[in-house]
Every structure is written in C-alpha cells, then in structure tokens.
Amino acid sequence: VRSWHINGERLLDDLNHLSSFGARPEGGIDRPAFSPACSEASRWLADRMREAGLGARIDAAGNVIGRLGPDDGSAILIGSHIDTVPGGGPLDGSLGVIAGLECLRSLAESGANLDRAVEVIAFSDEEGAYLSMLGSRAMTGTLTEAELNAAHGRKGDRLADAMATAGFDITKLHQAERTRQSMSNYLELHIEQGPVLESRGLDVGIVDSIIGIDVSEYVLHGQARHAGTTPMGERRDAGRAAAEAIVHAFDDLDLRAVPEARITFGDVEIKPGASNVVPGQARILSEIRAIRIQDMRQIRNGVDSAFDSAAARHTVRLEKRSLSGDVPSAMAPDMIELIGQICIDLDHKFMVMPSGASHDASNFASLVPSGMIFVASRGGVSHHPDEYSEPKSLVTGTNVLFETVRRLLARSNGGNL
Ligand SMILES: [Zn+2]
C-alpha cells in the first residue's frame, strides 16, 4: 500500500516556533484568546500558511483559516486551536493546527491536482478564556446572543471588549458561520491528554465519541446562626446540606457503574464563611461528564435528587440552574473505520477510545462525518508546562492524518491521488 509522508522536521520546527508566543520565563505558555500573544501567533500562522501557498484569512471570530484547492465547493476541514490555558503546554491544540498546516504544505508540494479543497483552521478561544469553543461554535452557528452578552474573562472583562481590543467586532461574529455544504469532513489530531495510550504502548488512538459536559449550579439557602448557641436539631445548615448532597451524588454515581462518567464538585462556596457561624448559604458547581446522552441525563437526575433530599432534610431552600450543557458527540463510523485501516496499513498499534476532554470536533460531528486521532501524552499530563509527547508520536499522528486526507481526496478524485 502506497502512503505519503509529511516532513517531520518541519512539523517539529513549527511547533517549537509556535510555543514561543506567550512563553513564560518560568516555563509554560500564557496564550489566551484575544491576548496580544495569541494575536501575534495568529498572524504568524497566517503568514506560514501564505508561505506554503495556501489562501489564508482570519474570519470574524478570529479563526485562522488556510485553504488549498478549488475556491468553491466543499472542503475537508482539519482543525484545532492555538490558544492555551494559563501556564499551558506546547501541544494541546497547537499540534492539530501545525499538523494540519504540514499536511496542506506536503499536499501542495506533491503537485497533486485537487478537485476538492482542504482547509486547516485554528479555532478561536477553544479553552474558554471568554467562551469555550467560541470559534468552532461561531462557524457552526450554535452561539446565542445571551451567551455572547454574558461572556467574560476571569478578571470580569467582557468578550466584546476583548474582541474589540484585538481588532474584532462582536456584532459581526455571525459572519464566521458557514453552510453545511461548504464542508465535507472534519478531522482533528490531538494529544490524548490522558494516560491510556502510553500505558498500553500504543501509537494512535481513534476517538469514537467525545464526552458531553453538563455544568450546573446549586444554591442552598439556610439560616446563618451562632455556632455555639444554636442546637444541632434547630439549625438550617446550608453547609451540612451541601456536604450530604455531594456525598450522596458520588454514591449514586458509584451505583450506576458507568466507567467513563465523571462528577466533579470543583467550586464550593460557603457563606458567610466563618468557623463560628452556621452556614447560611452554600453555592456548589457540579460538572458531569459522560459519553452517552442517556447516562448524562440519569447522572444529572441523580445529582438533582441528592440536592433535593439534602435540602428537604435540613429545611433549606434549593435553587438549581443549568449553566452550560454540551451533549456527547459521536465520530462517524466510516471515519473510525478509515483511520483504523490506515493504522493497519502503516503498521501502527492503535485502539478505539472515547475522549474525556472536549474538542472543537464535537461541534462538527453532527454536521459532517468527523474523525479524531490521538497520540500518547507522557504521563497523561496536559494543561501544564510538562505536557510532552515523543517527537516520533507527533510525526506518526501527522502521517496518519495526512493519509486520511489523501484517501478522502482520492474518493472524489476518482482514486487518482
Ligand atoms: Zn485542546
């Protein structure tokens, strides 16, 4: 079986160069969306695309897009992101974008005559400095006015202002939306960000589903009273109700035995927040992740009823509110099969696995046949300066991506590629 190859050295050089934008002296990268470092990286990327002979543009959402092949008609999209979390690593998102660039560059050099376009896209604000997956959601038209108005950064600065500072106009964001007809497939290469591939000694992971994430807020209103003079039986202790609800929510999850499901209560606030005052209020954020929508609903019901009954037991009033909900999304069986066949042909050891992290791919999965390729992360570490994958793995993943693009193109080029 004939396969094409990308230029590994060039891939690694570009990844290295990209990691200099927003690099902190103490290690790690600060490159949140719409920051000067991210804008500088976007302009550098657009320049690299032009040098490679691609048509390059930055759209109304800040997505950086490079295109090879016909100007009209549908395109195979290769996407990921170049923004980072605070103190992030050099590969999360960046690998997928630079790999996409390298694929298009190698394709351009091959001189192949394409009757279908291929695009590489760096999506804006995947990490949610203002609004998680802003760029891919803008492109697929799922953003609401209310979300855009409410979106703000960690310091309270509004998305609209951050965009304006970076030279974008939030009122024009809708211009980034694309028609279903302008895309034929979506592909994304990403580091696994977990320990599975490394621990099993595998080269490649083929994602079959991307986990859904539900974030909800629970506020318990009790009565703040003197901690010494108020008998235990006469308290309306919001803190105690919260503690019980959390324990019961975990117990409920354990009973369900859904191995890929997760519940995290990572943000708990007790008020007034003094050791000698019975808590009058507790605010808890719950985050639920699951790869099947029915699991998601059942686990959410379990958390809801844990809070309902704890609130009833301690005579506190409960307010619950959904803050965000991304439903789980499935990659196309046809794409899983195609990538699996490529791994067999290229002699790479692989497994089919779910993704516990969310990715831009989840926004395209319901629109076009989508596929995701994982490579091993050392120690499963990500969102951290120590994020690392073997250079060999990065090259392998990019070659699998390249071969996937080639075989998809060959289908419409009458096998002539
Ligand atoms: Zn990412």
Image (cartoon, helix red, strand yellow):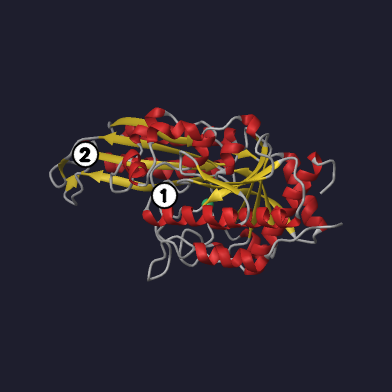
Kindly identify the amino acid type of the residue bearing the numbered disc 2: Gly
Q: Nearer the viewer, residue 75 or 203?
A: 75
Closer to the N terminus: mark 2 or mark 1?
A: 1
| Residue contact between numbered discs 2 and 1, judged by CB atoms under 8 Å | no
* Residue at disc 2, secondary structure: loop
Question: Residue 33 got which mark?
Answer: 1
**In the rendered image, the vertical position of residue 59 relative to residue 387, given as above or below:** above
**In the rendered image, the vertical position of residue 360 relative to residue 327, given as above or below:** below
Instruction: Tell how many labels.
Output: 2
Q: Nearer the viewer, residue 109 or 265?
A: 109
**In the rendered image, the vertical position of residue 320 relative to residue 126, given as above or below:** above
User: What x and y, as percent, mark residue 41?
Assistant: 46, 56
User: What x and y, as percent, mark residue 1?
Assistant: 87, 57
Q: Identify the residue at image location x=62%, y=30%.
A: 180
Whether residue 187 can be seen here: yes
Kindly identify the amino acid type of the residue bearing the numbered disc 1: Ala
* Residue at disc 1, secondary structure: loop
- Mark 2, residue position: 280
